[in-house]
Image (tube, rainbow, N blue to C red):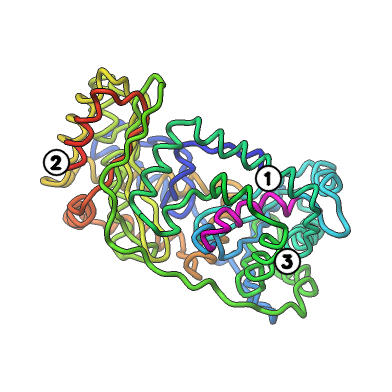
Amino acid sequence: MPSMQKSVRNWVTLVPPVKTVVAAIVATVDVEAATVAAESVSAVSVNDADIERTELASGVRVITERMPEARSVSVGMWFAVGSRDEPAPIAGASHFLEHLLFKGTEERSARSIATAVDAVGGEMNAYTSREHTAYYLRLPVSELQAGVELLADVVSEPAFRLAELDAEREVIIEELLMSEDTPDDLVLTALYESLYPDHPLGRETLGDHDTVTAMTRDDVASFHAQWYRPSNLVVAAAGALEHQQVVDALGPLFAGTESGAAPLRNAPEAHLQSLVQIDRPIEQVHVAIGWRGLPLADEDRYAMWVANHVLGGGMSSRLFQEIRESRGLAYSVFSSPSSYSDAGSLIVYAGTALARLEELLSVTDDVLATFLADGITEEEHAVALGYLEGSMLLGLEDSGSRMARLGTGLVTRNDITSIDEHVRRIRAVTTEEVHSVIRRVLGSPRAVSAVGPLGKGSAALERFACG
């Protein structure tokens, strides 16, 4: 949606597959306390028997989770198409389409859509990613039927009025300009281009000024007609509902629509660009480091989550402690993995003053070298396991989080891993498995991007990029 503002962390796909809502739930505990934390949060039950799935005759996949005590329902529609599926001349079409769908259908104006949601105290939003696009609502329980009908109308019957298309074009161009003026966004845009050169995974999800300016009504309408088909659609809902309610509400809505085909995707080649420097007259130098990581279904993904938490995923992490707490080199420093159907990455980000850039790079190099050589300690292992399990469960307290877990899981992997299985897999990760995945990822070539008043720091960045 146009109202959604990007942040550094929006640039990466955070895994585990449900949102984590506590920065470091067990940041300062020792091994014994971490074990207690893991045992206590595991007592929170999520009943996977309340999850039901149906595939409609049209090809639409429906998945719901019943939450009897909830006062709300969340319902969303996930389409298995994103920015990587766009031809280069219309890069940004998925995001443009996301903006336009809430601008009205043949029967509903943009105002009437907004009024219908506001009148019941609801919330409506959407987002575009590299491999899927989602539209979702949160409403009172009594409004489930109306919500399903509204979403179905919005995604299947857009009006594509020229005046609204031109207005949204200007909004998106402003969004691009805002991103270019935000150095922690820009440095990650450059990093992705370096990690996936000449591949759509490396493109900015918004597109660029040229493609957005040139986008026509026919371009957007044709993209919608090609990909917004029942076989590419997952409908997910959670709250005080019955599965059959959602199935019945959807039944007539997509009947008679041609099923469609899934996008054909080419995996990125192995090469990457080692260094990108963008000189800007700002206060800090923003630095991002990236390695090719793991695809969604990789068996090492649980070990990767543990490794990431120890490296830079929380307040107890090595990067946070060494760079921020011990030396005050940066306010913001973190690491995060992202995963796609056939590729993935691990990134590290920090920002510092030019005068301290060389020290930041040196400390970062030392942390990475030790991490690669020695792996993690038993204490770090216990803390990471407790964090992953606890934050996963805490992230399932509302209907929106439950809906997002179902929709994202089904549209990306056509499967939902049970909470019990996630917990079992997290607990089963060993320190040696973590060290193995560290060597696999951090032992590969890395890409570096930097944005800021580079000056004499340029030479230090060149040395750092060489590893």
Residue at image x 38%, y 35%? 24
Name the dominant secondary structure of the magenta segment.
helix
Q: Which mark is residue 369?
A: 2
- Mark 2 residue type: Ala
Q: Using a 10 Å C-alpha cutoff, classify the residue at mark 3 as few (fewer than 14 neighbours), some (14 to 19) or many (20 or more).
A: many
Return the mark for residue 169: 1
Q: Which residue is identified by label 3?
A: 246
Residue under the image location 45 percent in, 40 percent down: 9
Along the polypeptide, which appears first: circle 3 or circle 2?
A: 3
Is 94 magenta? The answer is yes
Mark nearer the N terminus (1 vs 3)? 1
Quadrant location, the N terminus: top right
In front of the other: 188 or 37: 188
Determine the residue located farthest toward the left in the rendered image: 373
In percent of width and height, residue 101 lies at: 73, 54
Q: Describe the element under mark 2 as helix, strand or loop.
A: helix
Q: Residues within 10 Å of mark 2 (few under 14, many from 20)?
A: some
Do residues under tags 1 and 2 come within 8 Å of each other at their CB atoms? no
Q: Does the CB distance between marks 1 and 3 fall below 8 Å? A: no
The three-letter code of the residue at mark 3 reads Val
Decide: is 319 above or below 124.
Answer: above
Residue located at (68% from left, 45% from top): 169
Secondary-structure class at tag 1: helix
Q: Indicate whether residue 179 is drawn in magenta.
A: no
Q: Is residue 248 left or right of residue 286?
A: right
Q: CA distance from mark 3 to mark 2?
A: 52 Å
Highlighted magenta segment, given as a residue range: 87-102
Earlier sequence position, callout 1 versus callout 2 = 1
> Residue 412, relative to residue 447: is it above or below?
below
Q: Is residue 318 left or right of residue 397?
A: left
User: Amino acid under label 1?
Assistant: Arg
Separation of disc 1 and disc 2 at Cα? 46 Å
